[in-house]
Amino acid sequence: RLRGLKPDRFLVVTDEAVEKHYGSYLDALGSDGTPVFKYVLPCGDQCKAMKHLMGLIDWSFESGGTRSSVVVGFGGGALMNITGLFAGIVYRGFRLVYVPTTLLAMHDVTTSLKTSICHWGRKNNIGIYYAPTLILMDLAFCRTLPQDELLSGLGELCKNAALFGGDHAKGFVEAFSKDVLNECCGGAAESLTLEDKDLVKLTRLGVRAKMDILCVDATENLQGMVFEYGHTFSHAMEKAYGDGTIPHGIGVCYGMLCSSYVAEKIGIMSAEARAEHDAMVRLLTDRWSLPEPKPSINKVMGYAMNDSKRGILEEEAHEITDLVVSKIGNIVSDHPSNLAKFDKKYVEEWFELMGFQWEQ
């Protein structure tokens, strides 16, 4: 499929971990004589920096890249984010192919047109929308995923389950309740494995969730904002802890627990609906505790109050924005973006209940 694009050269972007374990996976690209150039980035969000974006741009010119070249992103979600941005701006757009190697990248990242890097201490605040020419998924990569990466991919599927209910909630819960996950070590995260047939089922559900929305909102600015559920608080915790400390999907699950706390406090979610919602989310968070020491509430809220969604709802100084649901499968909002704003004091209360402290 890749050679069928008939490029003058392949520009392969990967990360250190993928290069170590699967460095030869794409060797056949050059078997017909097509030149192949490779650029290796740091792992995780460390790669999503302006210096690396500029490095990719310079490398593409040094390698003789032209409008006939094809960029191949080979790695996880963060790697896809910066590769997509790079491919979209050089020559106003290289042809782009994604070869995702993590569960999260397969069903959540590569199915989105969003690309990004992190700059000025903020999360995903520089980026464009850019569509790949091709996405190639090989679920065999998931068999060797580190547990954090598996949990991260499951976390975004949990988010879809909470947002859409129905088959998404059923499929996610069944993955835990019917021995699909191997819990031979008392349910510890280290023991989790996923059978191939269930991995295929969950990945298809994740892709379907994205495609159903992107068909009507390709840039995720209106209906597509639903995928931001829990992300205001997740991104804030991820940045406050330091990039790479909390797997993104797990951070999203903790962000969803914060949102459900707020939803009950402001009278949108009943105690019973919250209990059902949180029980599903805790299928993951109970297996991955937030590490100690926790960052200060001041630090987390500093990031949360500068989230990239801020300004869409014209918040007052004391307000913050995320999504709220009244129950699994029922989003509550009176704005086309599906977002809701509320007093930040409820978010601060949740962090206090979770054991975060104020810095005096």
Image (tube, rainbow, N blue to C red):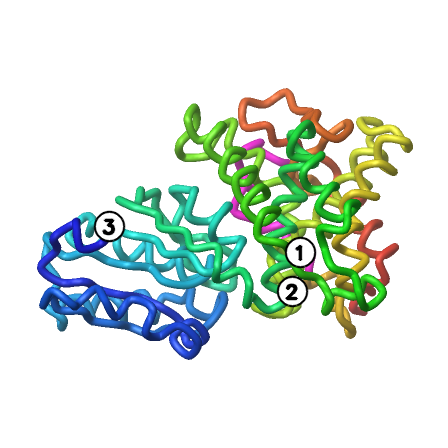
Name the residue tied to disc 3: 1
Near mark 3 (Cα within 10 A), the count class, few <14, some 14-19 or many ≥20, is: few
From mark 3 to mark 2, how far is it between C-alphas? 35 Å
| Nearer the observer, 98 or 127 | 98
At mark 3, the secondary structure is loop
**Quadrant, the C terminus:** bottom right
Image position, residue 20 (x, y; %) = 42, 79
Q: Which residue lies at the image location 67% right of the left edge and 56% below the top edge? A: 250
Q: Nearer the viewer, mark 3 or mark 1?
A: 3
Q: Is residue 100 visible?
A: yes
Q: Secondary structure at mark 1?
A: helix
**Foreground residue, 290 or 1?**
1
**Residue matched to label 1:** 251
Q: Give the mark, 2 or 1, whose residue is nearer the N terminus.
A: 2
Q: Is residue 199 above or below residue 237?
A: above
CA gap, disc 3 and disc 1:
35 Å
Secondary structure mostly seen in magenta is loop
Q: Seen in the image, is 181 located left or right of residue 34?
A: right
Could you say which is closer to the camera, residue 345 or residue 81? 81
